[in-house]
């Protein structure tokens, strides 16, 4: 008969292995189609990189501040930092994020 300690240890090892597999798959997955669509621009002395990933996008500001944006409907994007606004472009969403941080609304 298996002891509770041995069961919990085994379950923990399996869960950690599954998590590592998911993270590795997300990190090393085939993003070649999305990589070609990376948008880079400069707004108010901030370097911005927008990387679409399926129904979402990662917004990287100054290579250190990352914000997640999600597609809430076809052609509409939203983010948790500006929850009451939907944006038609990720660029406008990013500009409002930078403006919000500069006005002291939140810290990125």
Image (spheres, grey):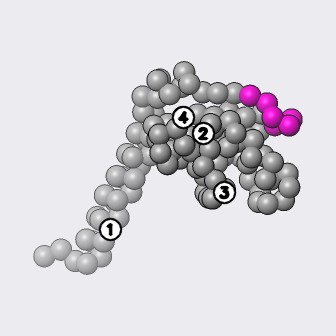
Residue 34 x/y as whole percent: 50, 28
Query: Gap in Å between the C-alphas at discs 3 and 4?
Result: 18 Å
- Please tell me how crowded label 4 is: few (under 14), some (14-19), or many (20+) other residues with Cα within 10 Å: many
Labels 3, 1: front one: 3
Residue receiving disc 2: 88
Q: Please tell me the numbered disc located at residue 52.
A: 4
- Please tell me how crowded label 2 is: few (under 14), some (14-19), or many (20+) other residues with Cα within 10 Å: some
Query: Gap in Å between the C-alphas at discs 3 and 1?
Result: 38 Å
Labels 2, 4: front one: 2
Let me know if residue 69 appears in the view.
no
Residue at 53%, 47% (x, y): give it: 70
The magenta region covers 41-46
Query: Gap in Å between the C-alphas at discs 2 and 1?
Result: 48 Å
- Please tell me how crowded label 3 is: few (under 14), some (14-19), or many (20+) other residues with Cα within 10 Å: some
Count of labels in the image: 4
Residue at 54%, 21% (x, y): give it: 36
Let me know if residue 99 appears in the view.
yes
Classify mark 2: helix, strand or loop: loop
Question: Measured along the vertical axis of the image, is residue 80 above or below residue 98?
Answer: below
Residue 71 x/y as whole percent: 51, 44
Residue 43 part of the magenta-drawn span: yes
Q: Please tell me the numbered disc located at residue 81.
A: 3
Labels 2, 1: front one: 2
Q: Earlier in the sequence, mark 2 or mark 3?
A: 3
Residue at 74%, 28% (x, y): give it: 41
Classify mark 3: helix, strand or loop: loop
């Amino acid at each position: 008969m298996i002891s509770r300690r041995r069961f919990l240890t085994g379950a923990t090892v399996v869960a950690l292995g599954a998590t590592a597999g998911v993270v590795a798959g997300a990190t090393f997955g085939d993003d070649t189609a999305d990589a070609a669509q990376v948008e880079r621009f400069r707004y108010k002395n901030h370097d911005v990189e927008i990387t679409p990933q399926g129904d979402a996008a990662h917004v990287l500001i100054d290579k250190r501040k990352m914000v997640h944006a999600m597609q809430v409907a076809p052609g509409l994007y939203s983010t948790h930092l500006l929850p009451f606004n939907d944006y038609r472009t990720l660029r406008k969403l990013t500009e409002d994020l930078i403006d919000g941080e500069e006005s002291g609304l939140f810290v990125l």
